[in-house]
Image (spheres, rainbow, N blue to C red):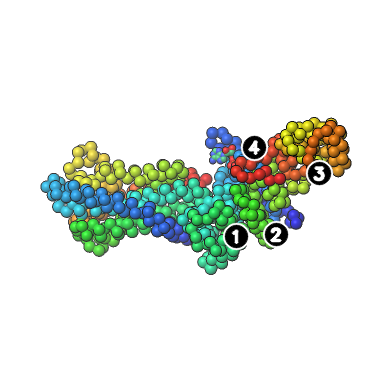
Amino acid sequence: MRTARATYYLVLRALRESVRQPEVELPNLLIPLFFLAVIIGAINQIAPDAFGVTNYTGFQVPVAMTQAVAGVAAVSGIVIVMDIERGYFDKLLLTPAPRVALLLSRLLADAVRSMVISAVILPIGLAIGSPLETGVAGAVVLLLLMGAFGAAYSGIGMAISLRSGNPQAAQLGVLLFFPLLFLSPAFTPIDVFEPWMRAVAEVNPVTYLLGGMRSLILEGWDAADLAYAVAAVAGLGAVTATLAMLALRFRAR
Amino acid sequence: MKERGCAIAVIEAEGLVKEYERGVRALNGIDLSVEEGEIFGFLGQNGSGKSTTIRILTTLLAPTAGGGRIAGLDIRRDAGRVRERIGVALQEAGLDDLQTGAELLLLQGRLYGMGGAQVRRRVAELLELVDLAGDAERPIRTYSGGMKRRLDLASALIHAPSIVFLDEPTTGLDPIARDTIWRYIERLNQEDRVTFFLTTQYLEEADRLAHRIAILDAGEIVAEGSPAELKAEIGTDVVTVQVAAPEDARRAAEVARGLAGVADVRVTENSAAVYVADGGAAVARIVRLLDDAAAPFTSITLAQPTLDDVFLRATGHYLQVDDAGEERAD
Ligand SMILES: Nc1ncnc2c1ncn2[C@@H]1O[C@H](COP(=O)(O)OP(=O)(O)OP(=O)(O)O)[C@@H](O)[C@H]1O
Ligand SMILES: [Mg+2]
């Protein structure tokens, strides 16, 4: 109860800051949209013949969404480092608010921000030719998946920030997403991968997240694909939340 | 003005030792006890361990050895309940640039579990107290250093704690802002019997506010008592001979050393301080000796010992303040 109350007010603070810093949020939107445009521009023509993807725009929209969400979720790590440096984190630690609320509030705020940015990208994708086979219900599931992924991903940045208290290290949270994305079937289906790359992609949670999202967009309801996506996000979330908890315990001795 | 209430210890530390990584021993066995309603001044120069002591007592930092109690609650086992009891303003005003002053205080109140109407009333009251009512809706980023300090102080008081820790509350403030903070502290102490544990590098601050002072040097308490007691321990008066040039000061010191009953003589750029038991009688004799020796001087004053003298006696050196633009408060 107390945790819920403290979390609620801390979420409000996080969202307030996000609204007050559009310059922090805007690149998270514009960079993925830029990539979306140039990748479609370069590959759209050959996609059907080269690897059998008939609507390459629909194939790329989930990539843009996950990329945007990873950017959004990495911000929390940076905010926490700033709070630590400014001493505000100490002020929060000095209150009787349960420690876990400090983490939980950031995860939840990131989930909300992730859903908002996804809700901006998805209609843009539809406007430039992506289908959405599962309709409105599918859109809701897509946003929920992105919210969950945002929360899961933000655990990485927070673990790094709380452990290191170092702004440069906090930036790692953003950079780490690129290997995760490039080692997944982000640009082409996994069937055309070299065997070693395929082996790596098969243990990469982003592979299953993209798979689930693409099935919602390109094919229709597929319970198995969705289950894999949910499991991948949940697994990632369990690992990052644990790391973040350990880092918080280190910081708040 | 500085009377003490009934003797209930609300802040206690026993054998506090803190060793940071790489073997920095910041505290080397601190014992202290602060009574309810007392203003306790913790005086020491940069790096003496003031902040470390505060961070340990306020549950932010675990001691390497030793322990403490706040309002009878163990700072390690009962950290959560200790936090409910204390208000803390750390050395760096820990604020959040993007919130407004009012938002920061409201959030702070919420985190202490205060309800809507209650917290709003309290925030309005505190903004009034620290003269920030007119700036409450501005982002903290636009506040001056003094405003940030005052807001930080207000946030430490949000839940009306009866025990308040302030780590160098006035360092870096101009004299007017300092005086304002001092008056808040005195008022809260007198009207609401708030106990204060405050660290300072300023002798003047300790002298004016503190009922009792502990002098911290290199992680150890080297003197403790009320300002008056500590000064009395010096046991002499101070006769200060003002001179125009450094060589005159040395000359005057030489002359004064010849006088019977002089305990100590210290030389500064433009004065010589003579520590002597019966200062009143000594003044006349010093003047005569200086005249005899044809040693030039501009004026001569007689004073009681100051905390600066106490500090020198206790630590073997003057209290040095790093802070730019601040004279030695004396
Ligand atoms: N996090 C830390 N890691 C290592 N050493 C530290 C740390 N914090 C403080 N110290 C060291 O511990 C000693 C005491 O520091 P502390 O901050 O308690 O002093 P202080 O009296 O508050 O000084 P100041 O007047 O400058 O604020 C110093 O030698 C300092 O360098
Ligand atoms: Mg300090």
Instruction: Read off the residue under disc 4.
Output: B218
Please state the chain letter of the residue tagged with numbered disc 4 in the rendered image: B
Residue A5, placed above or below residue A174: below
Q: Amino acid at mark 1?
A: Val
Residue B21, placed above or below residue A113: above
> Dot 4: what SS?
loop
Looking at the rendered image, the disc whose residue lies closer to the viewer, 1 or 4, is 1
Which residue is more in the foreground, A223 or A112?
Answer: A112
Please state the chain letter of the residue tagged with numbered disc 1 in the rendered image: B
Q: Are the two marked residues, 4 and 3, in contact with CB atoms closer than 8 angstroms?
A: no
Among all residues in the image, which is located at the extreme left?
Answer: A49
How many residues crowd mark 2 within 10 Å: few (<14), some (14–19), many (20+)?
some
Instruction: Read off the residue under disc 2.
Output: B190
- The residue depicted at 69 percent of the width and 56 percent of the height is B37
Q: Position of residue B7 (x, y in %)?
A: 73, 53
Task: Tell if the residue under mark 2 belongs to the same chain as the one under mark 4.
Answer: yes
> Residue B130 — which label?
1
Q: Gap between marks 2 and 3, in whole Å?
A: 33 Å
Q: Amino acid at mark 4?
A: Ala
Instruction: Read off the residue under disc 3.
Output: B302
How many residues crowd mark 1 within 10 Å: few (<14), some (14–19), many (20+)?
some
- Tell me, yes or no, if residue B12 can be seen here: yes
